[in-house]
Image (cartoon, rainbow, N blue to C red):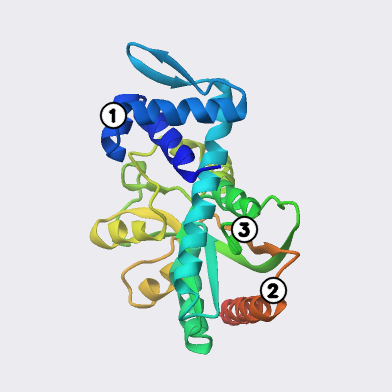
Amino acid sequence: MDINLARTFLMVAETGSFIEAAEKLNITQSTVSARIKGLEELLGRPLFERSKSGADLTAAGEQFRKHALALVRVWQRAQLEVSLADQHRDHLAIGATVGLWQGFLLKWIAKMRATAPDIAVSAISAPSSVLTQRLIEGTLDLAVMYRPIQPPGHVVEHLFDEEFVLVTSAKPSGRRGTSEYVFVDWGPDFQQDHAAAYPELASPGLHLDLGSISIEYLLSNEASAYFPARIVKPHIARGRLRQPKRARRFVYPVYMVYPEARDEETYELIIHGLRSAAGRFSRAAASE
C-alpha cells in the first residue's frame, strides 16, 4: 500500500476535515479525496462519515487508525535504518516508561555507546500499552517497563524491583497537610495502590504526569510526593529532600521485553549490558 494513503488518512482523522488535511499536507483537496477513496476501495469499507461539519471516523476507520500509525512508523524506521547503514552496523530502538530513563537507562545507553559505538540508538518514552503495541508491530527492538503484558513472540525477563518512596521538601518542624501533597502519576498500578493506601488524597490539588522531571517542583517548593528511591537518593544525601518516617512504600518489578527471534550477536550485547546494569543497581540498593 502507498504510504501516502496512510499519512493522508491520519491527517484527515486528526483534523476532521478534508480541506484542512489538504492544507497541512500541501496538496489539493481533490488529491486528498482521491487517496481516501482509493484506501476505502482497498479495504472495502467506508473510513469516514462526511458531513457539512467535516469528516468523522467510522467504526472501520477507528480500527484502521492503529494500523495506519504502525505502517507509518515501520516506514519511518526503514528510512532511518537505511540512512544509518553506511555508518553503523546495526540500529537499536528502545522504549521505556518515563520513570525508568533517569538514573538507570540513560546511564546504560552511555555505557553501551562507549562499548559498541557502531550500533545506532533511538530511544522513546511512552506508556506500557504503547510500548507493547510497538513491540508487536516491530518498530521497537526492546522495551523496559513495570509489569508488562507479554506480547506474542516475545521474552519477558525480570531486571530488578523498583521501590517508590515518599519524600518531602517541607521543613521537619512543619505539619504535612493535603494541600502540599503532589500526586505524581507513575502508571495504572501505582494509581490503584496509592488510592487504596491514601483514600484521603484521592483529589490532590496538584497532579503531575511528568515522571521524574516532577522532582523539580519539590526542589523549588515545599511539597511531598512519591518517587523511585534511586531518583531521590542524591537529593536526600544532600539534605534537599527527606523521607517521612513510617510512610508507605510501593514496590514494582521492572522487566525488559524483547523478541524470541532475534539477531543473537547484537541482542546478546544489549541484553547482557542491561542485566549487568540492573545487577549493579540491585546490589547498590541492597547494601544501603
Left or right relative to 42: residue 53: left
Q: Amino acid at mark 1?
A: Glu
**Mark 3 to mark 2 CA distance (whole Å):** 30 Å
* Contact (Cβ within 8 Å) of mark 1 with mark 3: no
- Work out whether residue 31 or residue 281 is closer to the camera in this orientation and state it: 31
- Work out whether residue 105 or residue 151 is closer to the camera in this orientation and state it: 151
Q: How many marks?
A: 3
Residue 179 position (above or below residue 157): above
Q: Secondary structure at mark 2?
A: loop
Residue 84 rendering spot, x and y as whole percentages: 46, 73
**Mark 1 to mark 3 CA distance (whole Å):** 45 Å
Other residues around mark 3 within 10 Å, as few (<14) / some (14–19) / many (≥20): some
Q: Amino acid at mark 3?
A: Tyr
* Residue drawn 33% across the image and 77% down it: 238
Residue 177 position (above or below residue 16): below
* Contact (Cβ within 8 Å) of mark 1 with mark 2: no
Q: Secondary structure at mark 1?
A: helix
Indicate the quadrant where residue 161 lies: bottom right
Residue 10 rendering spot, x and y as whole percentages: 43, 36
Residue 260 rendering spot, x and y as whole percentages: 75, 64
Q: Amino acid at mark 2?
A: Asp
Whether residue 76 is visible, yes or no, is yes
Q: Secondary structure at mark 3?
A: strand
**Quadrant location, the C terminus:** bottom right
Q: Which residue is mark 2?
A: 263
* Residue drawn 46% across the image and 60% down it: 124
Residue 262 position (above or below residue 249): below
Q: Which residue is mark 1?
A: 20
Q: Which residue is mark 3?
A: 252
